[in-house]
Amino acid sequence: TTTIRFNIALETFHRTSLVQIFDITGRLVETLVDGYLVSGEYEVIWDASHHSSGIYFVELTSGKNRSVQKLILLK
C-alpha cells in the first residue's frame, strides 16, 4: 500500500475532484476519489496488492488544476 497526500485549494472546492491511477500504457487502473471535497489536506491509501509490479501514474484533477506523479510498484 502507499499513501497519497494532496491539498484542495479554496477556489476549487465546489468542483469535482478526481484521484486516479493509470498504468504505463495510459489505461485507467483505479479511481480512488471521485466527488466534491472541501478545501484542505487529504490522504488516500492505494492498496496495490492485486496489481503487478511496474510504473503507474497518479493523477489529481480538481477544477482547472491537474497534477500527475509517477509511482513505481515493486513487489
Image (cartoon, helix red, strand yellow):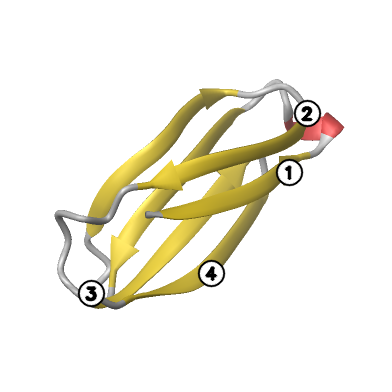
Q: From mark 3 to mark 1, how far is it between C-alphas?
A: 29 Å
Q: Secondary structure at mark 4?
A: strand
Point out the tag, 3 or 4, that comes first from the N-terminus: 4
| Callout 1 amino acid | Asn
Q: Residue at horizontal 53%, vertical 69%? A: 69
Point out the tag, 1 or 2, that comes first from the N-terminus: 1
Point out the tag, 3 or 2, that comes first from the N-terminus: 2
Image quadrant containing the N terminus: bottom left
| On screen, residue 6 above or below 68 | above
Tell me the residue that label 4 is attached to: 69
Point out the tag, 3 or 1, that comes first from the N-terminus: 1
Q: Which mark is residue 39?
A: 2
Pinpoint residue 68: horizontal percent, then vertical percent.
54, 65
Q: Residue at horizontal 47%, vertical 74%? A: 70
| Callout 2 amino acid | Ser
Tell me the residue that label 3 is attached to: 75
| Callout 3 amino acid | Lys
Q: From mark 3 to mark 4, how far is it between C-alphas?
A: 20 Å
Q: Image quarter for residue 36?
A: top right
Tell me the residue that label 1 is attached to: 7
Contact between labelled residues 2 and 1, with CB atoms less than 8 Å apart: yes
Pinpoint residue 42: horizontal percent, then vertical percent.
65, 37
